[in-house]
Image (tube, rainbow, N blue to C red):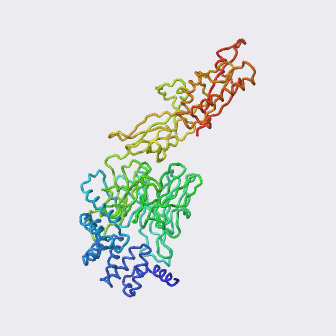
Amino acid sequence: MGKILTLFLFLGATVWAHAQHSDSLSVLKDWQVKGLAESARRINDPFQTKIYLEEWYRRHPESRKAAVQLGKAYLKTREYRKAEALFEKTYQEDPRQHLEAQYYLAQTQKIFGQYEEALEHFHILRARYRRIGDRSINRDRIDREMEGCLLGIAARDTVVTTEVYPLGASINQESMTFGPLLISDEEFIYGTITDDSPSAIHLDQPYAPSRQFFKAQKTEEDWQGNRTTEAPFTNAELFDTGRGTFSVDMQRFYSTQCFIDHKGKRICHIYVSHLTEGTWSAPQALDKNVNHPRYTSAQPAVGTLFNTSMEVLYFVSDRPGGAGGMDIWFSVYNKRNEQYKKAENAGVFINTSGDEVTPFFDLPSHRLYFSSNGWPAYGGFDIFYASGSMVTWDPPVNIGVPVNSSFDDLDYVKNWSGQFGLFVTNRPKTGRVTAGTSPDHIFAFKETESPRVLITGQLIKEDRFAEELLDKRLVRPMLADSLKDVLSHKTVSIEMIKNSESSVFLHEVTTNEDGRFEVWVDPGMDYKISVADTSLLERSFSVSTRNMDDEKTVEMETVSLNTIPQKAIVIDNIYYEFDRTELTQEAKAALDTTLYETLIKYPHIQVEISAHTDNKGNASYNQRLSEQRAANVVKHLVAAGISRSRLSAKGYGQDRPIAPNQHPDGSDNPEGRQQNRRTEFTILSMD
């Protein structure tokens, strides 16, 4: 076992040395060439794999296995014409036997948009799939390829309302670009390979990183890109960077840092920077609950959960326990204790035996966008979205043309309105495929029609509780501007109502100085908007974007929210027989139409029921009398269905008069005594 391990370590260490000197390959023995190719394949380096397989196939042109392996390497390096020619040659040598070559030939034809030809091959393969040597090519995989062909054929008649175009040469140069992150409609961060990157990687020397963060800014003419040193977009000295995302509250920035290990395998880990008092901390690697020491964790995206104190960190990993290839994983982050739970696989409702990569969580729609070559696609990687979170997902949806193409389409992001976004693709800019293909470059898209609805309004608060309780006027007078108490700088959260029993938290915004807010949402849905203010009795209200026709804005003007009363509220018409504690029928009816209805309307409030007397009689007697009367009010409400835990009874006797019991001349004041003989309630708290 020790000898085998040593051999593979040696092979891995020599991959890059031989790759730069193709003449030296001719002096290697067969077992060395084959071993180097296998070593490169194991570390997932298709470019080195291709070099050694080309040499192996040159020596053994009769080998069908070598031809298929080399063709697959060409697919990964995107040399599609070479791959097509090799698969076609191998397949035609024996069409009934070379089924694996036929499968990859059909895949290549899909990339060229030759859907009818590819579909014919897949129909044959579907009937013969048990005879294919590669067990990963099963009936389900073939069915998805066929579905992708049908998508491509149908797309030819699709009416396109989206404009797609490549960004200029300032950003898309000769090297690949990747990982766009929109900061605003005029600025985004992305990654690219630097001009001073090394031409070769030598494992016996410190790794020299080549991928770094760049910033793009929009000008009147075009987008302009430049290398950035601005925190938190930190370019590391020893690691590749260039890809990251912010937390929902913008207080953390997650980035990917990559290196080449001693075996020549590329491994990436996720780092986080924290914003504290306006300064970003240095990136720190996340713990083993997220980062696996021997496998990649990369391409972070952040989504929301039902609880605003938590968020979900989605990322891509090839660690054991996945569905196959690269999978989407997630870890739940708790803001209160700043802990990340152990990562879990996002499940087979979203991951396939292929690769799922470049996740992006769109907060207004609560959708996870990602790229996959395992779901039905037009060609290579297509962009999909799935509604849900963690392991619960609706079936993924292909977002369609023109963003998706028969080539690889990745790294999809869009702004809050959904009208502008970016993605990465290797499609030819000229529309024609030559011997090679374009490197990954950033394209933009614009929607000609607004896909989302803007909800806007001003939030104010007023104390109208007693008014609603006592006279129940349905129409309230408008407040004068001078009386408005605006809710400025308040956190406003928005939830999507899924059904009568559940909702999904989307995201938060903050009101401005005038109490105004704006949120982008999807049409055809119901929403609940909530305000974080403990002084409010009403902290949420409903908004619907259904039946809006062509309107794209919901202007709510002024939204007035009821505050918690700061004083006790007297319940009128609560009578007792003289010197008795039992409620009269009239008193019970008054409670049922006032306090009971209030407790039903606001199921989260806890109240104190208090009873008071005038000063006739003994003070201690009046105290006991008031306590019993308050207890009987609570007893009646509990019998009506109100939880006892929400109610407390308190008797104050004659200690808290609200009117004089005597006139200034010492004579009796019946009106004052009647006001003092009262039952009232106070809102103590909200659960």
The answer to whether any part of residue 567 appears in the image is no
Viewer-side residue, 511 vs 319:
319
- Give the quarter of the image for residue 570: top right
State the image coordinates of residue 442 (x, y, percent, origin top left).
Answer: 36, 60
Image: 267 above or below 150? below
Q: Nearer the viewer, residue 670 or 264?
A: 670
Image height of 224 relative to 534, above or below: below
Residue 557 percent across, percent down from the top left: 43, 34
Counting from the top left corner in percent of width and height, residue 653 is at 70, 25
Name which quarter of the figure residue 168 lies in.
bottom left
User: Which residue corresponds to the image point at 31% horizontal and 48% vertical from the top-left?
Assistant: 448
**Residue 384 visible within the image:** yes
Toward the viewer: 141 or 436? 141
Residue drawn at x 35%, y 52% is: 220
Image quarter where the C terminus lies is top right
- Figure quadrant of residue 110: bottom left
| For residue 61, side relative to residue 677 (left or right) | left
Number of residue marks: 0
Residue 265 placed where, x, y %?
Answer: 47, 73
Taking the image as shown, residue 12 lies to the left or right of residue 275, namely: left
Indicate left or right for 492 with 667 as reference: left
What residue sits 39% from the left and 87% below the top?
Answer: 29
